[in-house]
Image: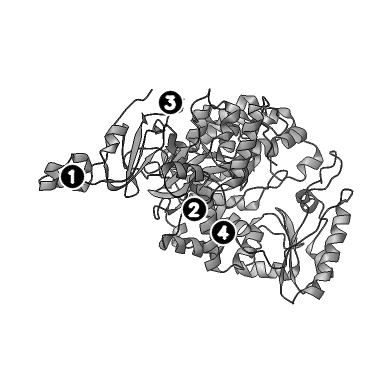
Amino acid sequence: MYKITSKFLVGAGMLYAVTGISQQLDSHIVHYADSIFINANVVSMDDVGVNEKVGNTYQAIAERDGLILALGSSEEIRKMAGPNTKIYDVKGRTIIPGIIDTHSHPHEYALEHWGPPLEGDVSVEADADDDWPDIVKKTVDLVAGLKATHKKGDWVFINWPRRINVSDERTDKTSDVALKVHRVLTRQILDKANTDQNIVVLGNRGVVNTPAMEVYHSYFGNEEYPDMDDKDGIYLSGSVVRVLQGELTPIPLFMDVMQQEFLEWTAYGITTFSSRIGMYNQTSAILQMDRQGRMPIRYAYALDSYWFRTMPDMPVFRTDLTGTGSDWLWMNSVSISSGDGAYPLLATTIEARPEIKEREVLRDRLKFIKEIAVRGLRWGNTHIAGDRTLEVALDMIEQGSAEAGMTAEMIQAKRHTSDHCRVNPRPEQLPRLKKLGVIMSCAPKYITGDGPDVARDYGDAYLNWVVPMKSIIDGGVRAVFEIDSHSVAGEGVFFHIGQYVNRIGDDGKVLAPAQKINRIWALKTATSWAAYSLFREHKLGTLEAGKFADIIVLNKNYFDQKAVPDLMIKTVRPLFTMIGGKVRFIDTALAAELKTEEAGIQPEQVIKQISEWETEAAAGKVAANKVE
């Protein structure tokens, strides 16, 4: 049943009601709508409270000049159509605000997915019985052989096994631990084999030889090797590779591949995302895209720690410019990139075996959060995986804010944000987060990505610290939605939203059921609550007159629990995406129904995966959660 409410945006033209034509026409259509959607289930999500209310619902919505002009009944909205108005009869389908992803890196995924293959990209493969010494020997042999096949100074990026098949009792199964803790491969080992080429062994943790390390060092122009051990060439963040590959990429190519990647994400219903920018080439490319009107999606960016380290006296680091920019690209925060490592290299306060604790990482760059707070800037878009790391970050906020003489209200107004929630916050941290007004940006992928490992390494009880959405929200802390992965291309955005609700592991077991949240809260984290995190709550996140016309039309009614049970939320997907009044995506079948052309990049993998889930459900099986 609809609660019909009419909201009309009165434009400047209404002031001219004395003109002859205005006297003859209905006041609502002095300026016609550019497009209207009728016979819809428009769910505005304009109740932003911590409750299960969605706010006002309507039958139709009108857009003009990129903004929502009005919402109301189909009859009311039809009156706003003129001879050139696009009319979309969606036949009862559900319309919601566009999805906001507060931490993903589509600008970084772009090169891999849409760019040309990297020159010299090769791989070391692990056989079933290989241990790390076997992998190292294969690597050294490959690197030595490159001198005969490559020119001096060529770049060679070597894909390395992320994991070997050894006993579960071993803690060095992953390359991250083998490199960070056991130093199984170093630049000295690589140098003995080859210093003619620039060698980069790829991974979240990887290794470079001396020539590559020197190029990386020259990028910063000081004594630092950010994220890299200058003694042995082991790097502790994938950001190192992104810098090296990024600076080898021409700006026009960057612009082309990012435009494609951004357009692809609109097919998943994502209309705005937030991420840090670390590479200078990439920053230049994105700024040019915005100036040239080539942004298919909205981007709230953070300046990465590389900027802060190399140019700390830039005006942007002396004045809080949070929220400034265009409608498509604006500054959101200052990032330190990461405060610890990906699992298992995160820093926790949990007692565990010595071999577990020795691999934990706590980065010294956390000290920059204090400097960010001292300068009155907003900190965010930063990888914070463990509860110990979060504790240090909060210490830095408090110390820096105190030094700056800020009141509690001033600190809260900064809306500092901690990202990922991998094994944080612990329950005792919630009052402190609430007091400081810190927002928690949480990625559902870590429920299954880290949960089983956390249970094995630290104990089942600590599953309640892995993306603890219920505890966060009940503790009065704002939680927002992030994906932090290109896996959305395989399963769709509602797979991730559904994980907040279901918390189903790959084996079908529920991980920490006490942390489940309802589907309305889950959607609010990705709409109205997320807009607040990006300082755009007055423009994004809900469907209200005067806000951006960022809307998606769904294939199913997300709000109908009978038609779409919790376990089938993942089968919901957008059929139509509009951003700022611009059509970015129309599903092929819906386009035929609407008698218009399909638009954007069709999400073929998502369509196939959803079909498989629906087939399993129709056969009476529980739709498998694991995505191959």
Q: Amino acid type of disc 4?
A: Gly
Q: Amino acid at mark 1?
A: Met
* Residue bearing mark 4: 278
At label 2, the amino acid type is Tyr
Residue 304 image-quadrant placement? bottom right
Q: Which comes sooner in the sequence, label 3 or label 1?
A: 1
| Nearer to us: label 1 or label 4 | 1
Q: Crowding near pointer 1: few (<14 within 10 Å), some, many (20+)?
A: some
- The residue indicated by pointer 2 is 301
CA–CA distance in space, label 4 to label 2: 10 Å
In this rendering, would 413 be left or right of 359?
left
Residues at circles 4 and 3 in contact by the CB criterion of under 8 Å: no
**Viewer-side label of 3, 1:** 1
Tell me residue 53's x, y (percent): 43, 26
Crowding around mark 3 (Cα neighbors within 10 Å: few <14, some 14 to 19, many 20+) is: few
Q: Position of residue 269 (x, y in %)?
A: 50, 43
Per the image, label 1 sits on a secondary structure element best described as helix
Q: Which residue appears at 62% of the width and 44% of the height?
A: 490
The CA distance from mark 3 to mark 2 is 31 Å
Query: Decide: marks 3, 2 in contact (CB < 8 A)?
Result: no
Residue under label 3: 53
Residue 14 marker = 1
State the SS at label 2: strand
Instruction: Inspect the image, locate mark 3, and give the three-letter code of the amino acid beneath it.
Output: Lys
